Image (spheres, rainbow, N blue to C red):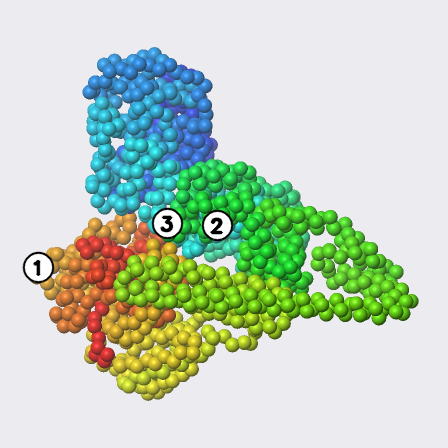
Amino acid sequence: MALADLDEFRIVRPLGRGGMGELYVGHDTLLDRPVAIKLIGSPAPDATSRERFLTEARAIARLSHPNVVGIYRVGTTASGRPFLVQELIRGQSLDRVARPVPAPGIAAIAIGIARGLEAAHRRGILHRDIKPANVMLDEHGTARLLDFGLAKLTRREPDRAWQRAPNTPARDSTDATVTRDRMSFAPQPVSGPGSLAIDPTADPDGDAPVAGGPVPASLTVPGAVLGTPRYTAPELWRGEPATVRSDLYSLGALLYELAAGIAPYPETDLAELERAVLGGQARPVEELAPRLPPEVARVVMRCLSRDPAARPASAAEVAHALEAAVVGSPAIPEGNPYRGLRAFAAEHRGLFFGRGGDVDLLVDRFRTEALLVVAGDSGIGKSSVCHAGVVPAVVAGALGDHRRWRAAGVVPGRRPWDALRHALGIPAARDAEPTAALVRGARPPDGEGLVIVVDQLEELITVADPDQAARAAEALAAIGDDAPGLKALCAVRGDFLTRVAALADVAGLAPAMTRGLHLLRVLSRPDLREAVVGPARATGIAFESEAMIDALVDTGAAEPGALPLLAFALAELWQARDRARGLITRASLDALGGVAGALARRADTVLLELGAVERAAARSVLLRLVTPQHTRAVCGRDELVEAGASPAVLEALVRGRLVVVRDTLEGAPACELTHDALITSWGTLRDWLDDAAGRHAVHQRLVAAAAEWQRCDRRGDLLWNRRQLEEARDLPELTAHERAFVAASHRGWRRQRARRVAAVLALPVIALAIWAAVRIAAVRAHEREIAARVAAAEQLRRRADTLADDAARLRAQALASFDARRDDAGEARWDEARRPSQQAHAAYDAAEAELMAARADSDTVRDAMIRVLTAHAALARRERERERFDALAQRLAAYDPGGPRPWLAAGHLVVDAPRAVHLAVHRRRAAPGDTIAGGFDRAPIAEEAGGHLEVALAPGSYVVVARAPDTTVRDPVVIEPGVRRVRSLALPAARDVPAGLVYIPPGTFLYGSDRDDDVRRDFLYAQPLHEVATGAYLIARTEVTFADWIEYLRALPAAERAIRTPASPTVTLEDQAGGFALTLQPSGAAIRSTGPMLTYPARAGHRTVRWERLPVSGVSWQDALAYLAWLDTSGRVPGARPCTSAEWERAARGADGRAFPTGDTLAPGAANIDATYGRQPGGYGPDEVGSHPASDSPFGIADMAGNAFELIRGPAGQPWLKGGSWYQGAVTATASNRSVAEPTQRNVRIGLRVCAGAGPAR
């Protein structure tokens, strides 16, 4: 073929031939790059063949995705043959990959194909020929979808119908004819309309598609079977239309073959294959591929379901399920999974559903653009897409640029340049330098990146200082010009887009803003349904019926502005869910008044809980938080208080979720409305705004009059008269000058009135008498109202006290059942206690509201309020509700700044340790600093020489360090308010504690979890947090190592040694002539020891480790019991045994109920968990024991969070797992979390730790 036939593309050599065309390696002579060139198969194609070929080109051209081959050019040769030029993939197709493929490789391939299919389906394209030959693995191991020759644009309608052809008789032969009704088998191909022939020599998994002849318009004969038989869905064999789920069947068949090494239906005869697919049942893939993770196997078998409705609904669902199986689902935060009127943040990414398409597209665009602008209507989800979708993906490495990205959030406010400068780390001292130079100089270090997320970009033109707005726009323009290592993601309301664009044009931001603009559209019905159902599903809650879900989706889809109302209603529905059944019910929705009434009712309820004076103040606050353009305004908290809003009113609005408070760069808190939906959908506020708009002209006249009065040295003749003052009476808060003008006008009018009244001498006396009588009557009426409200509040408080006592009694009974190992009875009684507890909180709230409504600053009201808040705070503290307690304590401080606080009363600690030569008490540190193990201050708060110490201590967590000449014992304690705690420590002699073990004295500690009951019970499998006791015992400072285990193996007879040698698909310990060797397969490829060392290829820190110091793994519960028995009988550790759950938790967390050995948080660098080495396949794996001293427990025990799961003995003697591992996240490493293990289970993530008995002074 002449080079001119293909314009600037030169054919280099043939590459292959497919069902639709010939494939060549080519060269782009203009851009000097290798390409793949595909020509239609027939030298003289007819019109329909040419149309089908161009359909493939259009299908690929509509896709731009890392898992789909890219297309560069479409053209026609001089002889009329169409051709397309596409990306040349260096790698190999899956049909050339050895099978079975290792399990980690299958998951990676499956995720890539699913992501590519998701992108295709999202654009209305069905592939319809998913098979190994149409998937390439590029040189980086990325799966890439090829050959859209059978792709169908699903949104196009057929231009014509084809006649049905009668079915032909079948025969058992590979000589096949495909009609458009179904697959049938006949000696000769059937010609004419309605029939499509295949190559008679084709086999079921050959390269040629079954249906060959292309057709116009939809290019699909109705009822035709397209694709490769081996991977064709049952409904397509029956002649039904292809759908998204038929593509997913093909994907399932492909994955099955990769995992098992054979197809799900291995029949070689087409007739037999048809019967097997339509009537048979594929053998479960896990039977043929036992190493395949069960979650992946379930996804594969779901895809192969004969009923399309039983398959996953989308490729996105497949990708999500596979990712969750491989890397674990994102952490699900506690509390309400629906955000209501608040945006989703990064920590809520596991609850963010419905915007996967937008997120993927934005991430794709971020690979080539430095600035993206997400525009859309108010409440459509711009902030959530940015913070919970794009940012977590970028930070997790989705850009694939080998940078470690972090994010910084910015809300412009009044000083947007200062906010951006702070986020970029530019010192204020350099503020005078050119903006672009400052931004370019703020580039992160090599290998790192910073994403600036600018939320509410419209504030540049609504509230920002103009000079600051201009500099902020210049800074964003500099980022948009591709400043190295910097990207910006902005969210702007669509109705302000043109005005922001005008500012951008002046600042040079317009080109980047135009390139990076992404219009966020209204959610489609399927996406809206996922947004409704997904968060509840993630927390284990279901909706009562499909009809209810449909009704909610109908409401959200009714109009663009309905989405925030739906979000608010869902948050309220979750709060009102049926906890016993785990259901969101229709009755709850009806009780809310439906979606439309939920927000307005909530807002009106908040106002009704206020007294008349407070409601007026709340009205004033809310009006000040709305701009003249009916957008949200930001006001300083102090500014609102100065204008007449009491702290109590602001607190009520914040608690009612109508107003949010956020910090500013200046350090002063600022207030704004929770969402624009309050402005557009709350009738009360709209009425207030309409009323305020009618007084706008009066206010403008007042502004002008006050300014003129000031300019003319406050001349009296410029003051307003009584009628004008009457018009201005209900104006909103005024400036100081305006207030001065109004006050002077009032004084002037009063002087005029006094002069008139003075003419009639008797009238003042009469008026005074009347006024006095009225005033006295009013005062007495107000005093009676105050007395009535105080009495009502006292009655409510007493009722709340009784309910709180009832709740405490039921909780005590529940905890007694838990301690007696009657967990079911304990949970039932614990649930029973919830009702009086909630009623008590409600009664305390009602008493507080009653006193606030008294509107009196009297000692009687204040004393009653102090009693209510004190009792309520005590209940919140007793029930460990930290947020509620902090809020109550803050309000109590406002009413009684210096008053007594029972929970702050000092406690006393008495320590007796007869053998000790020195005693020291260290307090738990609240912030990072110089600490000892467990996060306690290094400097003691009290110390004494000898064995006795008495000290008064503030309530809190402490550790006693008792030193004897030959040993040191730690004893964590919690000091309760007003309680005298006596600790008697019998220190053991050093000879009584075997090397490597730590003595734990008898004592009490907080056991269980204070997390939300649903999380505690259904995820952590933990009891409620409460105090329990243990006797003295010994526990190993580190996990059992491979060195320890090898010593054990060498002491065993050969037969027993073979049984107890760690061996599993992911860990193998081999006894070789020169010593032992270890092979681990934490994820991906296997890692083999080299001499005494083992190297992780993808790590920066702890890259090379001494493998004998790694925690032993690949041992079962039975192996562990045998090892512990050997330690006991050999005398190495007399009494060696597994740890109990209480012993393990006490050693891990000390006495104070902390979540982790370090405290209430666990940083990745403090322990070996999934995030420690970047969640990279070559970085997962155990560390040498003791490598992370930052996570040592209060007793100095190492690695009780992460590294390896540790086998312990459950209450009934069954094996449990504690502590998480290097493959799990921080939530799994929570000290109270436990999992159940199988007695024979061997796994690379499971090890053990030794415990043993100890006497009081062993």
**Residue drawn at the location 48% of the way across and 66% of the way down:** 799
Q: Which residue is mark 1?
A: 1054
- Residue in front for this viewpoint, 796 or 2: 796
**Residue drawn at the location 34% of the way across and 86% of the way down:** 948
Crowd tier of the residue under label 3, counting other residues whose Cα lies within 10 Å: few below 14, some 14–19, many 20 or above: few
**500 on left or right of 754:** left
Q: Give the distance between the C-alpha atoms of the residues marked 2 and 3, in whole angstroms.
A: 18 Å
Q: Which residue is mark 3?
A: 581
- Residue in front for this viewpoint, 567 or 423: 567
Q: Give the distance between the C-alpha atoms of the residues marked 1 and 2, in whole angstroms.
A: 63 Å
**Residue drawn at the location 39% of the way across and 28% of the way down:** 151
Q: Residue 716: x, y in percent? A: 87, 63
Q: Secondary structure at mark 2?
A: helix
Q: Secondary structure at mark 3?
A: loop
Crowd tier of the residue under label 1, counting other residues whose Cα lies within 10 Å: few below 14, some 14–19, many 20 or above: few
Q: Earlier in the sequence, mark 3 or mark 1?
A: 3
Residues tagged 3 and 1 counted as in contact (Cβ below 8 A): no
**1077 on left or right of 253:** left
Residue type of the residue flagged with mark 3: Arg
**Residue drawn at the location 81% of the way across and 55% of the way down:** 724
* Foreground: disc 3 or disc 1: 3
Q: Give the distance between the C-alpha atoms of the residues marked 3 and 1, in whole angstroms.
A: 55 Å
Mark carried by residue 571: 2
Q: Residue 758: x, y in percent? A: 89, 68
Q: Secondary structure at mark 1?
A: helix
Residue type of the residue flagged with mark 1: Ala
- Residue in front for this viewpoint, 1158 or 7: 1158
Residue 514 visible within the image: yes
Q: Farthest residue in the right direction?
A: 759
* Foreground: disc 2 or disc 3: 3
